[in-house]
Image (spheres, rainbow, N blue to C red):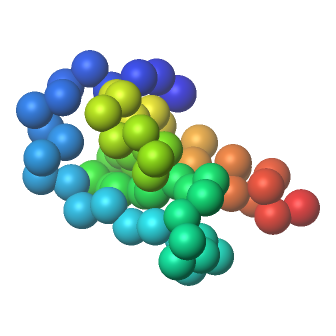
Amino acid sequence: MNADTKRGSERHLVWVKSSYSGAEGGQCVEVATRPGTVHVRDSKDVSRAPLAMTPTAWAAFVDFAAH
């Protein structure tokens, strides 16, 4: 994982919030995908650069978090 340094490319990302996130906000992450890259950001602080990782790394994280 690394911090995405291409801030201009973020304008073209479509961010999706987890269906487990409540309407009142709270601690949520948002995910956007591009071919070969999954971007993850804190929905409460979108001014920070998102993390960027490979789809394989994202799948491993999701699998780990699910167990």
Q: Is residue 55 visible?
A: no
Q: Is residue 60 visible?
A: yes
- Residue at 41%, 39% in the rendered image: 45
Q: Quadrant of residue 22?
A: bottom right
Front residue of this view, candidates 44 and 41: 44
- Residue at 45%, 33% in the rendered image: 51
10 lies above or below 5? below
Q: Position of residue 44 (x, y in %)?
A: 46, 47
- Residue at 52%, 77% in the rendered image: 23
Using residue 11 as the reference point, say whether residue 16 is left or right of it: right
Q: Position of residue 7 (x, y in %)?
A: 18, 29
Residue extending farthest to the right is 67
Q: Position of residue 33 (x, y in %)?
A: 33, 56
- Residue at 68%, 57% in the rendered image: 62
7 lies above or below 15? above
Q: Position of residue 50 (x, y in %)?
A: 39, 35
Front residue of this view, candidates 10 and 52: 10
